[in-house]
Amino acid sequence: MIEKTIRKQVRYERNDINAAFKKAPLFFNAIQPAKILNISKQGMAICSSQALKRNNRLKITLCFNEGERFFLHGLVVHSFNKPNKSDDEFVELFLEGAASPIALPFKYGIHFEHHNLRFRDYLIESGCRNGFEVRQRGFYQRQARAD
């Protein structure tokens, strides 16, 4: 018997949130910008120029266009270690005042370490208020076989 497990967490595809992170607990790491591919109350998928490994701890800053800011702690739970060089999935980040865009070749799945109720509520309310669509995504799929 084959059983399919599909992620049941609702993911939001938002373009009104800016993200930056730095590796923790090192004090001298530079803050790295990231592009959010999708986000939920429990985590997010991002693209970054910084090479990270699974289980790296991050200090994350999320800034909404409406001015609200959240500081969260995250853990890299999924890492595509090889840079993505295909044209159909190439991601760039355009920063205000920068002469050229920043290439973001690495893709990660980040889990937020603590549940932040104020962040959860704001994520949902601001999405509804600004007309963002909610899409349930089966991002990870696993098949188990019963022999």
Image (cartoon, rainbow, N blue to C red):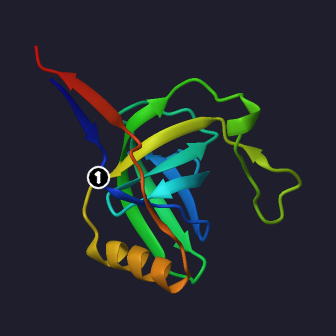
In the figure, is residue 102 to the left or right of 41?
right
Residue 59, image quadrant: bottom left
Q: Residue furthest front?
A: 1
Q: Position of residue 116 (x, y in %)?
A: 28, 69
Residue 123, image quadrant: bottom left
- Helix, strand or loop at label 1? It is loop
Q: Nearer the viewer, residue 73 or 3?
A: 3
Q: Position of residue 7 (x, y in %)?
A: 31, 46
**Residue at 27% across, 74% down:** 117
Density class for disc 1 (Cα within 10 Å; few <14, some 14-19, many ≥20) is: few
**Residue at 32% across, 58% down:** 42
Decide: is 24 above or below 18.
Answer: above
**Which residue does the numbered mark 1 point to in the structure image?**
8
Q: Position of residue 40 (x, y in %)?
A: 39, 61
Decide: is 13 above or below 93.
Answer: below
Looking at numbered disc 1 in the image, what kind of residue is underneath it?
Lys
Q: Residue furthest left?
A: 147
In the figure, is residue 66 to the left or right of 90?
left
Q: Nearer the viewer, residue 120 or 86?
A: 86
